[in-house]
């Protein structure tokens, strides 16, 4: 199995929606026993909201712009193809948006400057995996990341204003 494909899985929107859902179940199951309850609650709110809004914006852009992927989808009639290529439009990258939302949500809530490199290394590696698999261009992943970062910051600001 291709290492870039394995890394790419960690940017999958489905994986993170499942993880956030399980964290939500865990949060309600533990109730008052949870040590950092407010931190987890704010993380879930920021991450879920940012992820859903980002994925919505990404899908609208994909459908509206309809930019094809830089790869050939495998079909019975095509002999030279990319096994990782999807038939959906390319721009912007949903995997890049997802990994950027996760990193931004962690950073915006945790706010430890010394960890910023570690936190944001994750989406950069996921972005490179999408390019190295040949399913996106650099522009696709940069756009997906920027959309997600902007939306995460806006969601964070809205939540912080509502808390006051």
Image (spheres, grey):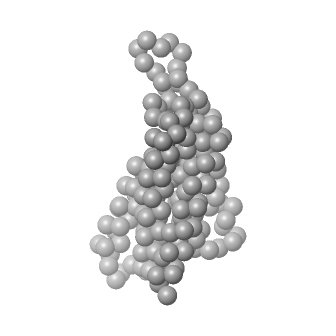
Question: Which of 118 and 138 lies nearest the eye of the viewer?
Answer: 138
Q: Residue furthest left?
A: 29
**Can you tell which quarter of the image residue 49 is in?**
bottom left
Q: Residue at x 48, y 56 (%)?
A: 54
* Residue at left offset 34%, top offset 83%: 32
Measured as percent of width and height from the top left, residue 44 is found at 43, 68
Residue 161: x and y, percent? 51, 81
Q: Quadrant of residue 152?
A: bottom right
Q: Can the viewer see residue 20?
A: yes
| Rendering coords of residue 91 (x, y %) | 55, 41
The image shows residue 151 at horizontal and vertical percentages of 53, 62
Residue furthest to the bottom = 164
Answer above or below: position of 127 versus 122: above
Q: Which of the pair 5/84 is nearer the observer?
A: 84
Left-right relation of 132 to 66: right
Q: Quadrant of residue 17?
A: bottom left
């Amino acid at each position: 199995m291709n290492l870039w494909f394995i890394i790419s899985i960690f940017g999958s929107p489905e994986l993170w929606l499942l993880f956030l859902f399980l964290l939500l179940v865990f949060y309600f199951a533990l109730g008052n026993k949870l040590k950092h309850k407010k931190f987890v609650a704010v993380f879930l709110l920021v991450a879920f909201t940012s992820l859903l809004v980002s994925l919505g914006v990404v899908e609208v852009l994909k459908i509206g712009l309809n930019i094809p992927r830089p790869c050939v989808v495998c079909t019975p009639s095509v002999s030279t193809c990319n096994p990782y290529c999807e038939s959906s439009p390319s721009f912007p990258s949903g995997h890049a948006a997802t990994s950027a939302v996760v990193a931004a949500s962690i950073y915006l809530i945790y706010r430890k400057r010394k960890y910023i490199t570690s936190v944001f290394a994750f989406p950069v590696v996921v972005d490179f995996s999408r390019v190295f698999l040949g399913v996106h261009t650099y522009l696709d992943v940069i756009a997906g990341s920027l959309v997600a970062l902007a939306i995460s910051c806006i969601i964070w600001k809205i939540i912080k204003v509502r808390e006051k």
